[in-house]
Amino acid sequence: MKYTIGFTDRAIETAEAIKSQLLNRWGLTIAEDFDRRATQIVQLIELSPEMFPVSRFYNSLRQAPVHKNCSMFYAIRVNKVIIHFFWDNRQDPLFIK
């Protein structure tokens, strides 16, 4: 079964913030690599949303690694997956809300 994917406003904002940071710090190639990896993860989640573990910070969200420094947090609904936000793994997890 293929799930429908939805993005919250916060997911879009946090993805753009990370991409902007990568672009400014490391250049276009790295920023495009982030986009490519995020797209691949979304495609995997679309087909098998339970393949990534439940987050240790939030029981209601799953955490998919986009890169060793970045994760995507999402929730599974009946036939839909909601991407809630992207997170720089080097940040203090106490501030995730």
Image: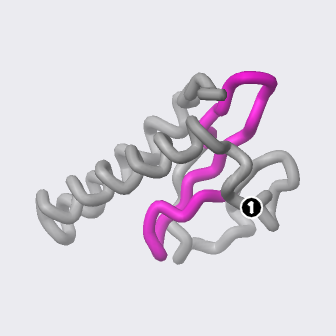
Res. 97 in view: no
How many numbered circles does the render carry? Answer: 1
In the displayed structure, 59 sits above or below 78; it is below
Element carrying mark 1: loop
Q: Position of residue 37 (x, y in %)?
A: 36, 56
x%, y% of residue 65?
54, 64
Above or below: residue 21 compared with residue 85: below
Picture quadrant where residue 93 is located: bottom right
Which residue lies at the image location 59% right of the left edge and 58% below the top edge? 64
Q: Where is residue 16 in the image (x, y as percent from the top left)?
A: 35, 44
User: Main SS type for the magenta part?
Assistant: strand
Task: Tell me what residue is drawn at x 74 percent, y 68 percent.
Answer: 94
- Residue linked to disc 1: 53
Q: Is residue 67 left or right of residue 53?
A: left
What range is drawn magenta here? 63-84
Question: What's the residue type where badge 1 is placed?
Answer: Pro
Q: Which residue lies furthest to the left in this view?
A: 28
Closer-to-camera residue (17/5): 5
Task: Tell me residue 8's x, y (percent).
Answer: 57, 29
Quarter occupied by residue 23: bottom left
Which color scheme does this rendered protein use? one colour
Asked whether residue 18 is in view, the answer is yes
Q: Which of 39 and 25 is in front in this view?
A: 39
